[in-house]
Amino acid sequence: MTAITLLQGDITRQSADAIVNAANSSLLGGGGVDGAIHRRGGPAILKDCRRLRASLPQALNCVRAGETPIGKGLRTGQAVATTAGNLDARWVIHTVGPRFSPHEDRSALLASCYREALRVADELGARTVAFPAVSAGIYGWPLEDAARIAVETVRAVATEVEEVRFVLFDERAYGAFAEQLG
Ligand code: AR6
């Protein structure tokens, strides 16, 4: 039985077996929670990300905004683990959420982020996993819908993880998740 808990705060201050990062396909860092995790976690995380990226089979033509194509990347909806560096965790699990689109239903990809992150957590033997609201920031997913997908997906997954902790940055996000948990 997996307990779902909610907390308002900064995910980089959490103590957990694994902390999930809302990354982008480059795995090379960015803004939002991604930037915060790399900042507080230190360079060991980026070093591990570079190593992982080099070993990825797919040659995605992924482009960071305004930059040159970087070749390889993690596909949207997938997840990989690295060291957690200086964070109070054993691993960071990086997942790439979809950008919200008003023209295309990408919900399955967002659900996949939570499922894949928990699959990786099971592989690692992580028992406590902290998640941010994937895609609900820079990627523009409406908060209420992002919360619904997150909670529904985690509830439906069969996992050995004992605690899934949603760590929401502000009151509004906390409220949206609390509403879903009922
Ligand atoms: N702790 C917890 N939640 C946070 C924190 C924090 N320290 N910082 C932000 N949030 P976002 P995305 C919340 O933008 O939408 C990056 O550049 C934030 O308020 O971090 O998946 C990546 O490299 C929001 O509710 O992730 C990608 O390019 C939620 O975390 C892109 O942003 C997710 O917001 C990914 O965008």
Image (tube, rainbow, N blue to C red):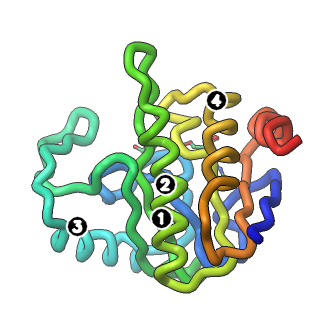
Q: Position of residue 23 (x, y in %)?
A: 43, 53
What's the CA distance linking mark 2 and mark 1? 6 Å
Closer to the chain start, of discs 3 and 4, is 3
Q: Which residue is rendered at x = 14% and y = 65% of the image?
A: 57
Residue farthest to the top, as pictured: 103
Observer-side mark, 3 or 2, equals 3
**Disc 4 target residue:** 145
Packing grade of label 2 (10 A; few <14, some 14-19, many >=20) is: some
Q: Earlier in the sequence, mark 4 or mark 1?
A: 1
Q: In x, y percent, where is residue 15?
A: 72, 76
Q: Are marks 1 and 3 in contact (CB under 8 Å)?
A: no
Question: Looking at the figure, which quarter contains the N terminus?
Answer: bottom right
Instruction: Answer whether residue 35 is visible to the viewer in this image.
Output: no
Secondary structure state at the residue bearing disc 3: helix
- Give the class, few, some or many, for how many residues have Cα within 10 Å of label 1's Cα (few <14, many ≥20): many
Tell me the mark number nearer the camera, choosing from 4 and 1.
4
Tell me how far mark 3 sits from mark 2, CA to CA: 16 Å
Q: What residue did someone put label 2 on?
A: 34
Residue type, numbered disc 4: Asp
Label 4 sits on a secondary structure element that is helix
Instruction: Examine the image and state in which quarter residue 161 appears.
Output: bottom right
Which numbered tag is attached to residue 53?
A: 3
Q: Nearer the viewer, mark 4 or mark 2?
A: 4
Q: Are marks 4 and 1 in contact (CB under 8 Å)?
A: no
